[in-house]
Amino acid sequence: MNLALALAIFWPAPLAVAGETAADPGRRESPTGLPANAVADYQLGGAYEPPAGVNVVVRDSSAAPASGLYNICYVNGFQTQPATQWPADLLVADRAGQPLADADWPDEYLLNISSQKLRQRILGRLAETISKCARAGFNAVEFDNLDSYTRSKGALKKADALAFALLLVRTAHASGLAAGQKNTPQLTEKDRQGIGFDFAIAEECHRYDECTAYTRFYGNKVIDIEYTDNLRGSFSDVCADPTVPRNTILRDRKLSPATHRQYHYEHC
């Protein structure tokens, strides 16, 4: 049976996908989960000294982790990072045969995870980044753009994304890293259980009334980032909403370092 069809019909036992294997980065320590009293900072726009009280920091895979804190490494798992080169056959093509870019991020191209063979080749490259995160001292990794299949103009299916997400999570766990779901509230509980994510990072779940899509499965293991340019009400209103994750922060849209004029950070 074709793997994509099989995944669309049923989920195999966790961490066991017939015919597909995760890369082995060589580290076998057990992943450490998010702190119970997590207060996060989201620093993808550039690393800086975290504000007082912060004990969880998310930084790009190219940055160093923050000393003494729980660190989450950002990896663009389903699209290319800007200014990186990928073989053309590993990218989704549009009708003109050109790489298909994300409409909101035109310097990011969708990875072609439409077959087992392609997924394995893409995984081989991303496994190097995951291993780098582990060696640098990160505790966890978040995989962005799981929902790229919804922007693929039919080239990718949900089953492709689920199959590849499972491989990424297996690779992270093999490296001793916890693995986080990024956005994609449309995943079902069955989807999430099959993939094996350990926590979730949601952007603007209050603004779009999606918070319970994460908290009903992950409980307190959810980090929510709201943005100053798109709030629904005041940030006090956000924090007072009982559906909002306890670990909710407010950032400027560009996630600027603390030295920049537009920098903004608050937490509930």
Image (spheres, grey):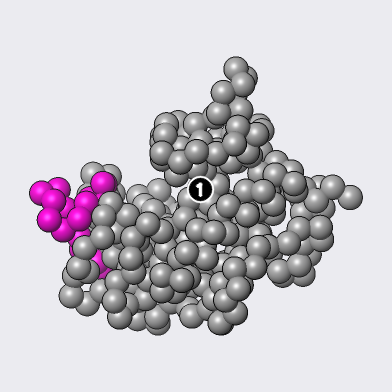
Is 177 or 231 nearer to us in this picture?
177
Question: As shown in the figure, which amino acid type bears the numbered disc 1?
Answer: Asn
Residue 6 point in image, percent of width and height: 82, 53
Where does the C terminus fall, quadrant-wise? bottom left
Q: Is residue 242 visible?
A: no
In the image, residue 264 lies in the stretch drawn in magenta:
yes
Q: Label 1's element?
A: loop
Q: Residues within 10 Å of mark 1 (few under 14, many from 20)?
A: many
- Judging by the rendered image, the residue that carries numbered circle 1 is 145
The residue under the point 63% across, 38% down is: 90
In which image quadrant can residue 118 be found? top right
Residue 98 seen in render: yes
* Residue 265, position as x, y percentages in the image: 20, 60
**Residue depicted at 47% across the width and 55% down the height:** 75
Would you place residue 221 above or below residue 124 in this image? below
State left or right for residue 193 relative to residue 217. right
Number of labels in the image equals 1
Identified at 65% across, 63% down, the residue is 23
Q: Is residue 69 magenta?
A: no
Quarter of the image holding residue 137?
bottom left
Q: Is residue 28 or residue 155 the one in the foreground? A: 28
Seen from this angle, which residue lies furthest right?
A: 1
Q: Residue at x 30, y 80 (%)?
A: 68
The stretch in magenta equals: 252-268
State left or right for residue 36 relative to residue 91: left
**Residue 165, x across and y down, in percent:** 62, 56
Is residue 44 toward the left or the right of residue 212 in the image?
left
